Image: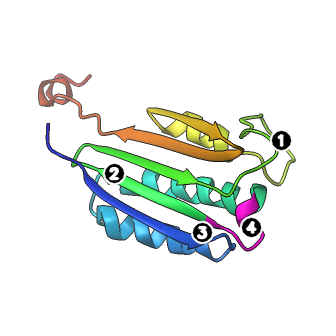
Amino acid sequence: MEPPEYDSWTLPGAPDQVAAARRLVTAALGAGHPLHDDSVLLTSELVTNAVVHSASRDGGTFTLTVLSTGSRVRVCVKDGGSDGPPCACRASLTAQNGRGLPLLDALSNRWGYARQNGVNTVWFELVLVTIPTEWAAAGV
């Protein structure tokens, strides 16, 4: 197994940092990485949660960490803390928000969070799955 590439940044907890986080993930992975698009989308969701729902938004910071190989990506966002753990509640059909963690649940191979002293670290992992050539040739 190849050793992962590792990048980490501490950013201000401001809404404009969601776009900055997307750019950093693109820089870390490269736009041609097969897991790039899902990684950028899910990072955007985690960072949005950090700057909207945690103490990071009140002049604090959050830390974005990306570990990657050619076939795996793990992204972690550590925020400034909140009153409660992240909620993967289902949003109503007309809700304007509340879809970030369910999207994470749907697209990632696995995800989770850790809480220590009120600080949340939310992470996801993506794994590249390829279809064997003989399956495609068989029309499966």
Q: Amino acid at mark 3?
A: Val
What label does residue 57 carry, if any?
4
Q: Position of residue 102 (x, y in %)?
A: 66, 38
Q: Which mark is residue 67?
A: 2
At 20% from the left and 30% from the top, the residue drawn is: 136
Q: Earlier in the sequence, mark 2 or mark 4?
A: 4
For mark 4, give the secondary structure. helix
Indicate the quadrant containing the C terminus: top left, top right, bottom left or bottom right.
top left
Q: Position of residue 30 (x, y in %)?
A: 29, 66
Q: CA distance from mark 1 to mark 3?
A: 25 Å
Nearest the viewer among 104 and 52 is 52
Q: Secondary structure at mark 2?
A: strand
Query: For this rendering, which residue is in front, 22 or 58?
Result: 58
Label 1: which secondary element = loop
Mark 3 vs mark 4: in front: 4
**Number of dots carrying numbers:** 4
Gap between marks 2 and 4 measured at Cα: 25 Å
